[in-house]
Image (cartoon, rainbow, N blue to C red):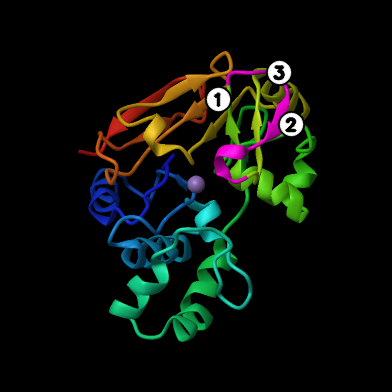
Amino acid sequence: MVGDLHGDYPTLLRLLKICNLAKDCLIFLGDYADRGSYGVEVIETVSDLAIEYPMNVFLLKGNHEDYTHRGEPTFFPSNLREEVESKRGTWEKYFQKKYKLFLSQLVLAVVLKGKLLFVHGGVSSKVDSLEKLKDPSREVEKIVLWSDPFDGLGERLNYKRGGVGVEFGADITKLVCGQLGVFKIIRSHEPRKAPNGPVYSHENKIVTINSTSIYGGNPFVLRINPINPTNLEAVRLK
Ligand SMILES: [Mn+2]
C-alpha cells in the first residue's frame, strides 16, 4: 500500500527497488503530483507500471487527480501544470495525449473482499454498498476523495477542506465497514498526520499512511499479507 507521493520520485524509486512486481502487488492511494518537484516523473512511472503489470499495480484516484475534461484542476493549489510546461511542453497537449490516459487508469477504491477497503480520503454514510464505489455518483466521488476521519461522532461537512467531503466519526466507520463487509479502511490524504508510521483511529478500523518525504518525516509503505491481512507491517522508504 502506497500513500500520497506528491511528486516524491526518489521515494518511489526506493520502493521499486525493494519490491518484485512478478509477485508483489502495489496499491497506490492517489495524490501523485503537486507540492513536490517530480510529479511528472511519478505519474509517468506509475502509469507505465500499471500498463506493464495490470494484475499487480492498482492506481487509486486522489483529490489531486480530479480534473475537468478540459484539463482544469478542481482543487487548489496545483503546480502540475507549471511542472509539465517546464519539462514536457504545453499543458493542453500533455493533458490530451498523456494525462487523460493516466486518469483513465485510476479507480476510486480497491476492496480486498471481506477484509480491507482502500480509498484516498474516506467514507460517509452515503457509501453504503460496493456498487456505489464501482459506479460512483459525483457526490460519492467527492466524499471518497476529500473526507477525513475525526474524533467526534456522526458526520459533518469538512470545513477544514473548504466544506468538500465530510469529517466522519467512529460510528460512521463502523457502519460503513459493516455494510461493505470489511474490517479496516486504509487511506492516505493526510500525510502530515502520519509522518513516521501508520496512524490508527476509530478503534483501529482506520489506518492513515504516508509515503512522501516532502513534509519531512520518514515515508513508508504498508505491507499486507493477503492471506492474513490483520497483520499490517510498515516498511520505511528512507
Ligand atoms: Mn489528498
CA separation in Å, label 3 and label 2: 14 Å
Circle 1 sits on which residue? 206
Q: Amino acid at mark 2?
A: Leu
The mark closer to the camera, 3 or 2, is 3
- Residue at 49% of width from left, 73% of height from top? 99
The mark closer to the camera, 1 or 2, is 1
- Dot 3: what SS? helix
Give the answer, above or below, for where 209 lies relative to 206. Answer: below
User: Mark 3 and 2 residues: CB-CB less than 8 Å, in contact?
Assistant: no
Mark 1 surroundings within 10 Å by alpha-carbon count, few (fewer than 14), some (14 through 19), many (20 or more): many
Circle 2 sits on which residue? 180
Return the x and y of residue 231 as percentages of the image width and height: 45, 20
The mark closer to the camera, 3 or 1, is 3
Q: Quadrant of residue 212?
A: top left
> Which is nearer the N-term, disc 3 or disc 2?
3
- Dot 1: what SS? strand
- Residue at 40% of width from left, 38% of height from top? 191
Circle 3 sits on which residue? 171
Give the answer, above or below, for where 182 lies relative to 79. Answer: above
Return the x and y of residue 166 as percentages of the image width and height: 66, 37
Q: Pick whichever, 212 or 81, lies toward us.
A: 81
Residue 174 within the segment the image draws in magenta: no
- Residue interval drawn in magenta: 151-162
Q: Amino acid at mark 3?
A: Asp
Q: Is residue 214 left or right of residue 114?
A: left
- Residue at 37% of width from left, 52% of height from top? 6
- Dot 2: what SS? helix
